[in-house]
Image: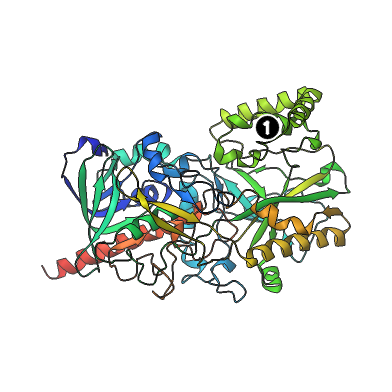
Amino acid sequence: MIIDANDLSHGDLLSADVCIVGAGAAGISMALDLADSALDVIVLESGGLKREQAVQNLYSGTVSDGRLHSPPDRYRQRRFGGTTTIWGGRCMPLDPIDFEQRDFMPHSGWPIEREALMPYYPGANRLCEAGEFAYTAAAAFALPLRPMIAGFESPYFTTDTLERFSCPTDFGARYGRRLRAARNIRVILHSNVTAIELDPAGTRVASVAIRTLGGKVLSARAAQFVLAAGGLEVARLLLASRSVQARGIGNTHDLVGRYYMCHLAGTVGALNINRPLDAVWHGYDISDEGIYCRRRIALTADAQRQYRIGNFVARLHHPRITDPAHRNAILSLLFLAKFVIPYEYGKRLHGGEGASLSTWLAHVRNVAAGPLDAAQFAMHMLKDRKLAERKFPSIIIKPKANLFSLDFHAEQQPNPVSRVTLMNEVDAVGMPKLNVDWQYTSTDVTTVERAVALFAEEIHRTGLGTFVYDPASIVFEMTRYGAYGGHHIGTARMGNDPRSSVVDADCRVHGVDNLSIASAAVFPTSSQANPTLTIVALALRLAARLRAEAKAAISIRQSFA
């Protein structure tokens, strides 16, 4: 069932076997997996069924460098469904190398291998509505696909790996009915967790404190607690809960909030393929299940080891939208319409706020010169994105010549100096606000520099064309838009040693027997991959553990009965 905390009485105590904090992708996935089990489950969600500005304001905070990171209330949604209410739907698993301890990637290495997640990835794919778990073109398509770039064969890059796209699925809207009907699930809306209260020994969570914006105070007790909030909010809750552990829960070694990663992303260079137009395919292929899939130019694991750099993928991309020199009516139409495009998708259009009148007029001239192209594109976006249940994932512009830029997405090194911390200022429910100090390293720069240079060399070697870029521009391009999107990773990292990690291999907070975390906060490394699919897979793995432990406990009790 779904209940509103505003309808409960001041001082009420909620009790359950499992208490999940957060109803986003992780929390809803766990609740669905535990539905109709023997466990009584409550899910505490700060927001309601729709976006409410007063609730969203609880995410407000500061950033150390506004050029490098968006405000903390951007890219995150504090409501039922969480940030799946605005995500783009891009799904892919992490690669095997991402789990390895690599001597060239400081602080790398997971305490589990990818095989530990493989039983849960297919279920995650289903929940994300991304079709079957098949992430190579050969596995996903019965017939061979047309080449991405005809003749491009490289020992360093592959074009066979895929990203698959969700609808994108709003987990709240899609699965709310199932949670409402589940006999053992209670979702409590408008319930803001303000403290995790430990027992006097500090080894177990006794309860969590809850406040509503209207001033009601409640609490929840459970045998097991799970923080299923995002990478920023998990750190905030742990750091703010200081009644027993003075530095915050799990923070004995000053690790909570550190190693904060997003992804490195940007657009660089001019790729000119000297082949016919049909020699290049940079758009979407549709699988037999009707899933949009797209191939990337992916740096192989062997190349990463050889060149001692992080994971890296790239996509063929249109020229920079904000520059009217592209003379493309569709791109100029997007520039002119940028004020009605949501921040989460339009940040790359927000580079022209100071554009001169002549720049605006040049974009207008581009649209006027190609009215049919602009009209057809607008119709395509209306039909295949705005009105479609499964939306066309992104803007694909077929150039009149094989001229592209390179849109890259790269792994960021885990960096203990990159961190989030608490401020003295508190929000409307008394929680300290966050300050975000995202930083990049020389390793990050080297990953992008070497990967881009290697791609340029391979294009030249194969004789397919030219890739021209300014090597001195790499740092500028990879920081032009700052930390990439809503990928808040690593703030409560997973590991075997409490001196270098916050949770163990089972996502349980070191030293606190009944507190676990289901979030990208536990990722020790970021990979090149968008995190949502792996978040859901980890949540399903955690749910399986809780079910198994509960079953074992029942069996033990029965044996003594």
Q: Tell me the element at label 1.
A: helix
Tell me: 295 left or right of 194.
right
Q: How many other residues sit within 10 Å of disc 1, few (<14), some (14-19) or many (≥20)?
A: many
Point out the residue furthest to the left here: 561
Camera-nearest residue between 453 and 116: 453
Residue 189 x/y as whole percent: 30, 40
- For label 1, the residue is 334
The amino acid on which the numbered mark 1 sits, given as a three-letter code, is: Leu
Image quarter of the N terminus: top left
- Residue 408: tell me if it is visible: no
Name the residue: 67% across, 43% down. Answer: 284
Image quarter of the C terminus: bottom left
Name the residue: 35% across, 60% down. Answer: 239
Tell me: 1 left or right of 111.
left
Residue 184 x/y as whole percent: 25, 47
Camera-nearest residue between 33 and 414: 414
Residue 31 x/y as whole percent: 34, 49
Residue 528 x/y as whole percent: 60, 58
- Mark count: 1
